[in-house]
Image (spheres, rainbow, N blue to C red):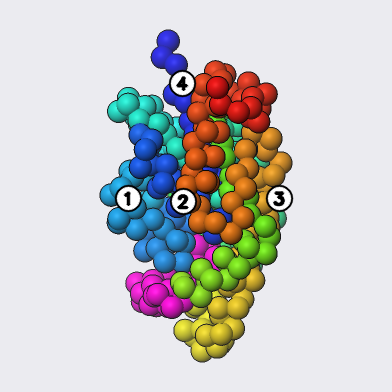
Amino acid sequence: MKRTPPLIGIVGPTASGKSELALALGRTWPVEVLVADSRQVYRGMDIGTAKPDAAARAAVAHHLLDLVDPDTSFSVAQWVALARSLIPEIADRGRIPMVVGGTGLYVAGLLDGHDYGSQPFPAELRARLASQLAADGLGPLATRLRAVDPVTAERTDLHNPRRVLRALERAEMGSGGVRRSNQPYGGRLALIGIDRPRDVLYRRIDERTAEFFATGLLGEVRGLLEAGMRADMRPMTGHGYQEAARHLAGEWSLDQAVEVTALRTRQYAKRQLTWFRRDPRIEWLPAGDDPADSQDVVTHGERVLRIALDAGPAERVRAIRYHEPR
């Protein structure tokens, strides 16, 4: 039986430097990146998601970018299925798959397995669909259900608001009314995160937000809106895009849009830290205010990865995580 390939990962909050560290490791390690970012899957959303540019993709192969348009439903189950199919392909090329990103649900689905059919539906999703029902009526929601899950639409009473909402919840969670599950990842595993003081992380977020607006985010959002994307679409409500749209609509000043984007991004980073701090498999690399691709951070990351990958089964990684290399 073919063994499950080893998997390494860089996870943690936005703006901590995950992509920079991944590229630095890619200069000496034979890696290919699986991007675990729920917004970078959307085509045309590049600046506000800090999507790796052409130079980064040329230096290190990146996967799971630009998968769908922003008006297309995409679920964690779809992402996990794609990621799991790519891992053996990468290994067959003699390279190491490396998951990089801050979407905790994607990472958890890949590493730990989830039963998508039995997951409780997030209150945010249910509230959003109910709000759309109240604003637009049942017709647009029924049309969306036919588009994203025609099989379920055929057996759903499309004149019953409760049944349509329930079916859409399942479709957007990736289950389509069918119970789906996967097993925990069975290969060797090594995870690292970049640990920064909170004030440093928040300053980096503020600086990056200002850079987004200064280097084309408004033009990117204007182009998406002109292409037919609505400001209330789920991807367009993410931090940066929602604020840019409100500025373009004349509702907010540019300063207000930048300020609110930075605030929402800091709040998001705090939630990411809460999520990832619960995972004892992650070895946190103290970076202070240093660049993530500085020699000290890169050397520490390489050491942790080598120890973990040499350790054997994934369950032994925690026992040796603080040992010095032999």
- Residue at image x 39%, y 75%? 216
- Where's residue 253, x and y in %? 55, 88
| Residue 274, label in figure | 3
Q: Is residue 139 visible?
A: no
Q: Secondary structure at mark 3?
A: helix
For residue 232: magenta? yes
Residue position for label 4: 4
Q: Is residue 102 visible?
A: yes
In this picture, residue 323 sits left or right of residue 150: right
Position of residue 308 relative to residue 35, above or below, is above
What separation in Å lies between label 2 and label 1 (alpha carbons)?
A: 16 Å
- Neighbour tally class for label 2: few under 14, some 14-19, many 20 plus, Cα within 10 Å: some
| Residue 57, label in figure | 1
Sequence-wise, which precedes: disc 2 or disc 1? 1
| Residue 293, label in figure | 2
Magenta segment range?
213-241
Sequence-wise, which precedes: disc 3 or disc 1? 1
Three-letter amino acid code of the residue under disc 2: Asp
Three-letter amino acid code of the residue under disc 3: Thr
- Residue at image x 34%, y 58%? 53
- Neighbour tally class for label 1: few under 14, some 14-19, many 20 plus, Cα within 10 Å: some
Task: Name the outermost residue toward the top.
Answer: 1
Q: Secondary structure at mark 1?
A: helix
What separation in Å lies between label 1 and label 4 (alpha carbons)?
A: 26 Å
- Residue at image x 42%, y 66%? 47
Sequence-wise, which precedes: disc 3 or disc 4? 4
In this picture, residue 37 sits left or right of residue 220: right
Q: Secondary structure at mark 2?
A: loop
Which mark is nearer the camera, 3 or 2? Answer: 2
- Neighbour tally class for label 3: few under 14, some 14-19, many 20 plus, Cα within 10 Å: few
